[in-house]
Amino acid sequence: MIPRYARPEMTAIWSPETKFRIWYEIEAHACDAQADLGVIPLENAKAVWNAKEVPFDVARIDEIEAVTKHDVIAFLTHLAEIIGNDEARFVHQGMTSSDVLDTTFNVQLVRAADLLLAGMDRTLTALKARALEHKDTVRIGRSHGIHAEPTTMGLTFARFYAEMDRGRDRLRAARAEIATGAISGAVGTFANIDPAVEEHVCAQLGLIPEPISTQVIPRDRHAMFFATLGVIASSIENIATEIRHMQRTEVLEAEEFFSKGQKGSSAMPHKRNPVLTENLTGLARLVRMAVIPAMENVTLWHERDISHSSVERMIGPDTTVTLDFALNRLASVIEKLVIYPENMLANMNKFRGLVMSQRVLLALTQAGVSREESYRLVQRNAMRVWEQGADFQEELLSDPDVTAVLSHNEIIEKFDLGYHTKHVDTIFARVFKE
């Protein structure tokens, strides 16, 4: 997590100040619930809230931890310094460190998910706007990187919209799955704390109680969460790769916005490189890097160990900060993307009608020619286009085996671009539900 690829809204979620503030709220809400149950005096519970407006001294907590070698104890010691040792006597009553750590981690992941959902909404809005703008802008579709048949730029954007929309649904589900808390005490049996405390704390933090915890919240939830982030990152890379392809000099159907004063190369002044989408490709790799460790964290010894802890201290902030930055960078790229319809048309016509070969093939079979023979006739003429730069339509019109079956007008009709775009509205209605 470095400032170059971070937005302050997301990094704030993972700051020590935010973490300690959530720890404090958990402890204070737990004290309220304990007081309601008559377990601790009401005045002690109220006294904990005296620290509500007091900023925690991160350096002081670190200083204490250097001695205690325990972060939660260091925090509790500092809290007692603020509100008084006697007043803090019942703080953390019946709780274990993981009650605080795990519940806090999930609160942070929920908050991070909300920012990520906002980033996805921005990306979806941009994709939809460009899809509608270029719904009928014809470009060549490619398979294996080779010209296939005509499509539209709008369909390209609509396809990416549908993919990101599925990602948004997955993230909402992952957010719901991670939004649990546990205040169940050592090994999760509630032996020293009433389940009502857990219910109260979770309600105050916008979580639901974990149905059954050990000493930790089950890590399959976190595996699901980070796997979802990995899929979203892959979708970002999918879009970025298409843009990078379109910006290649010999393609140039679209390119990243190149601002006044921007430089593309220290050596070659003519360069305009797809640096943002190349960057997104790299950031996607970093997000996916967290998926396997998150899945390996599912396996813990007995009721708990902390082999997951060091992993999560890194992948929690790094992955969410990186993905948040990537989503907003992608949205900006799409919003400003420069598109060249005339280049799309020129690219499609580069091989002079060759991309209409399937229409001719189908017409021959419908006219009574076997599929094998139809394929042979079409491919024979197509290869002259590939190898000699011939015009496909002219080749077909001069082939007696073809004209013996198809009339002049029937052949000409097979080169109508509108044939390939006639169902665009149907596809858009499916994608955008409009």
Image (tube, rainbow, N blue to C red):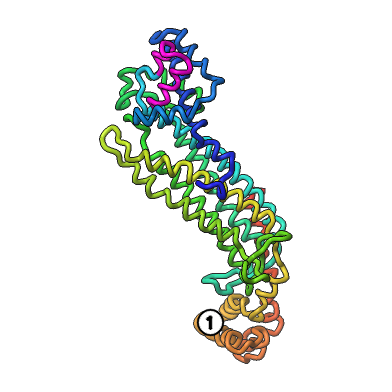
Residue 114 vs residue 395, the one in the foreground: 114
Q: Which residue is mark 1?
A: 375
Question: Quadrant of the rendered structure where residue 194 is?
Answer: top left
Q: Is residue 243 left or right of residue 15?
A: right
Is-magenta flag for residue 86?
yes
Q: Is residue 419 left or right of residue 196?
A: right
Q: Predominant secondary structure in magenta?
A: helix
Tell me the element at label 1. helix
Tell me where the magenta segment starts and ends, as one range.
Answer: 72-91
Q: Is residue 188 visible?
A: yes
Where 395 sits versus 325, above or below? Answer: below
Q: Is residue 56 left or right of residue 155?
A: left
Is-magenta flag for residue 226?
no
Query: How many numbered circles does the render carry?
Result: 1
Residue 182, how many percent across, how many down? 40, 27
Q: Is residue 182 visible?
A: no
**Residue at the spot 54% in from the left edge and 40% down from the top edge:** 11
Q: Is residue 217 left or right of residue 205?
A: left
